[in-house]
Image (spheres, rainbow, N blue to C red):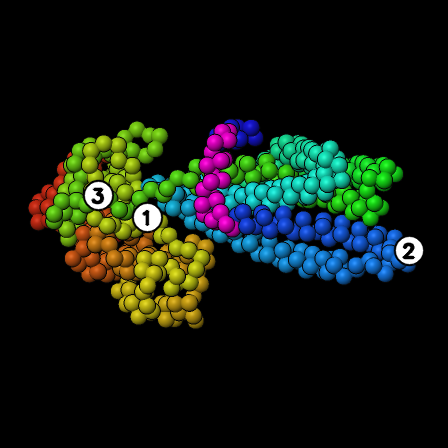
Amino acid sequence: MREGLDRHPRSGKGAWTLLRALDAMAGRRLWLGGALLAALTVLMGMALLGLSGWFITATALAGLVPATALVFDVFMPSAGIRLLAVGRTGARYAERLVTHDATLAVLAALREKLFRHWSRPQAARLLMLRPARLLQRLTSDVDALDSLYLRLLVPGMAALGAALLAGLSFGLMRWWLGLLALAWLLLAGWGIALWHGLRTRQAAVRRAMALEALRLQSVDLAAGQAELLMAGQLPAQVAAVLACDARAAAADDRLYRAEARAAQAYGVAGALTLSAALLAMGSLVERGQIGVAVAALGILLALSAMEPFAALRRGAAEAGRTWLAVRRIGKAAVEEGPPQAGRQPTPGAGLAVQLDSASAAHPGQMAALGPLDLHIREGERVALIGRSGAGKSSLLSLIAGELPLVSGRAAAGFCCWMTQRTELFQDSLRGNLRLAAPEAGDDVLWQALEAAGLAQDVRAMPHELDTVLGEGGLGLSGGQARRLALARLLLHPARCWLLDEPTEGLDAATAGDVLQRLAVAARGRTLVLASHWQREARLADRLLWLENGRICGQALRGTPQFDEAIGRLRPDAGN
């Protein structure tokens, strides 16, 4: 558990940078406005209680003497009480409106920031390696940041306002009494919150990490139960889920116990404050330095002064979780997102792809490609062939801007990459198609489906374009999913298409139909495809065979070398 924590920076500088970034996302007026409204609500509540106590006491005393009762003004205090009551209600409503508006605006902007940060090269590869972790960052970690504002900053400002009001009120009676009240409230109120936050920090972090592990283990259990059962690992996976749940429950138990002790501490502090106020007010009344009505006001102010500090209890309990979230996503939240993948430097005139002494590698690995010299003309069709691991997919990654360039120069026009995996989402058919063309109308979508050979199947579905797919395109056969990916490719405005094993996993008839439609749709476009199949390589005007990340040779259509290279590939009948 400690190793997971130590991978994150501990510097407070990053937290302060994140706070400034969050401030810029929401706007200072919203952040400070919400905190000031919260303070105003607390001050009006305390003033209402104090004024009501003074008014009741003063009225009762005035009633004892008929002459005093005749001249006693009951209208101004009663009007003040009504004003404070209405004002407190309005301030509370405005405070909730402003604070939640600010928080939701910040969280939405932060998620957009994270999406942009994660749209860097290699993002898809990293997402496949750690999907649960990145999902946790985007959901739970972002949600945990609302405690910074809603449960720490806003209650802290309100508590400060309460302490200042109590200090000022007691200071008007005796200056030393005001200073003592202010110092005691700040020391006790904030001190208990700080103690509570430090005491629960480890438990809050353990709970967060246990819940993240529980999510990961549960997803693996649900998604891979068939494989786990066949491997005899299903009981072990169930045991792992139960162990994660037990760790989260143990952390919850520690948090609940600590929160109960913090509530007791605030209760004791409130009782001490009230007792000290009773003694002080009684002493001042006995000496004739204040009246009984003023003493009642002071006692009721003391009664309510500690309550705003108690609101910090929940924020302090979640401070460890919030701090962990800051350390996890702080860097991504403050950095500007990198250029979008697929946007390479512009190649020379008439070229779609231009590689000059280009070398590339996956992060943390030795060079996977290069050095390479490759020029592909606009409208040319090139097939990359070679054994598995030769570097075909890596070369497509480099052209697409996904694989980081180590040395040399890589330039390409705007590319669209169709990988070996058919990436479909739990959305309608229309939604999956519009990923490539968000503004496309239904008539354009139907044309793309017709060109991909899927229109007839979609028309046979009860909801046609509104048909909702399951996760990963569940509800479509392998051939239908590949055709849907092809239709999405046809909708994309890129003039350069990158295809990685476009018909892998399809039967010969379906593969032949998909390739025939692809050849027609690709007229006038640049086509770069990686393949082991003769049927795919026949689309090319030029073959490039790779070995160990380097181009070992090439052959043009119509030459004996071209036919010889095609013959070494996997025959169509082998599918």
Q: CA distance from mark 2 to mark 3?
A: 93 Å
Q: Which mark is residue 420?
A: 1
In the image, what residue occupies the spot 62% across and 41% down? 156
In the image, what residue occupies the spot 63% across and 50% down? 40
How would you classify the magenta stretch by its main secondary structure? Answer: helix
Mark 2 neighbour class, 10 Å CA radius: few under 14, some 14 to 19, many 20 or more: few
Mark 3 neighbour class, 10 Å CA radius: few under 14, some 14 to 19, many 20 or more: some
Q: Answer with the quarter of the image where residue 375 lies.
A: top left
Q: Nearer the viewer, mark 3 or mark 1?
A: 3
Three-letter amino acid code at disc 3? Pro
Q: Position of residue 264 (x, y in %)?
A: 76, 38
**Stretch of the chain drawn in magenta:** 10-30
Residue to which mark 2 is pinned = 65
Based on the picture, tell me whether residue 18 belongs to the magenta stretch: yes
Based on the picture, tell me whether residue 121 belongs to the magenta stretch: no
Q: Is 153 rendered above or below residue 194?
A: below
Q: CA distance from mark 3 to mark 1?
A: 25 Å
Q: Of marks 3 and 1, which one's residue comes earlier in the chain?
A: 3
User: Along the horizontal axis of the image, is 517 left or right of 209?
Assistant: left
Res. 296 in view: no
Mark 1 neighbour class, 10 Å CA radius: few under 14, some 14 to 19, many 20 or more: some
Q: What SS does tag 3 mark?
A: loop
Q: What SS does tag 1 mark?
A: loop
Q: Nearer the viewer, mark 1 or mark 2?
A: 2
Q: Position of residue 180 (x, y in %)?
A: 73, 33
Res. 98 in view: yes
Q: Of marks 1 and 2, which one's residue comes earlier in the chain?
A: 2
Three-letter amino acid code at disc 1? Gln
Three-letter amino acid code at disc 2? Val
Residue to which mark 3 is pinned = 345
In the image, what residue occupies the spot 88% across and 53% down? 61
